[in-house]
Image (cartoon, rainbow, N blue to C red):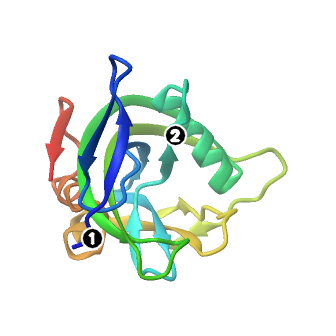
Amino acid sequence: MVEVWQTVRMTNGKQAQGQTGGPARGIEVIARGVFVREGHVLMCVDVAGGYSYLPGGHVEPGEAAARAVERELLEETGWEAEVGGFLFAAEHRFKQASRKKVGRVMQKHEVNLVFHVERLIVPDGVTAGVAGDLGLLTVPSAEVGLEFRWVELAAAVDLDIRPASVRAWLATGAARLSPAWVSE
C-alpha cells in the first residue's frame, strides 16, 4: 500500500499532517437521477469499462444537488429534466487507477445522492426514437464512450452497477417510501 502524508488546514486555521493511505481529494458529492418507466430504469453505461451507473455527476460548489441532476442530464443528453424528491443516499469508498499518472491508485470517497426524475423533456424539433416494444424513448448521449440504456429493474442485481449499494437498491424496485442511507 502506498502511504501518503498530506498537510491539511483544520477549521481552527492550524495545519496538521495525516496519513491518507493513498492520494485522496476529500469526499466527492455526486447527484444522480433515477428515471423508472414500465419496470425499467435508465442507466448510463461506460462502454469501455463495461459497467453502469445512474445518470448524474458532481455537484458544483454552491449548486443544489437536485439542480446538479438537471444540469448533468442536459449536458449528457441535450434534454432537460424535471427532477423530483430525494430518494436514496449511498456512501461509497473505493480505489481507482489514476487517469493522469500511470501506476498510481487513488483512494476515492463518494456520497451519491439519488433523486427521482419525473420526466425528460425532448427538445422541440427533435424526433426521439423508441426503444423496443415498451415505448421507452431512445436517449441520446452527448459524451463519447457513454451510452444510455433501459435496464429491467428485476435484472439489476445481475449487472455491474456502481456503486453496489445502488444496484441492490434498484433490485428492490427503487420504490422506497422513505429516503434511505447506505454506507459501504
| Front one among 82 and 39 | 82
Task: Say if mark 1 contacts mark 2, CB within 8 Å.
Answer: no
Relative to 96, does residue 40 appear above or below in the rendering?
above
User: Outermost residue toward the right?
Assistant: 125
Residue 174 seen in the figure: no
Query: Which sits in the foreground, 82 or 7?
Result: 7
In three-dimensional space, the C-alpha distance between marks 1 and 2, rounded to whole angstroms, equals 35 Å
Q: Is residue 179 left or right of residue 151?
A: left
The location of residue 12, given as percent across then percent down, is 33, 16
Question: In the rendered image of this protein, does residue 129 appear above or below residue 38?
Answer: below
For the question of whether residue 37 can be seen, the reply is yes
Quadrant of the image occupied by residue 89: top left
At which x and y percent is residue 15? 35, 31
Q: How many marks?
A: 2
> Residue 2 has which mark?
1
x, y percent for residue 125: 84, 50
**Residue under label 2:** 69
Q: Determine the secondary structure under disc 1.
A: loop
Label 1 crowd bin: few (<14), some (14–19), many (20+), radius 10 Å: few
Q: Earlier in the sequence, mark 1 or mark 2?
A: 1
Q: Amino acid at mark 1?
A: Val
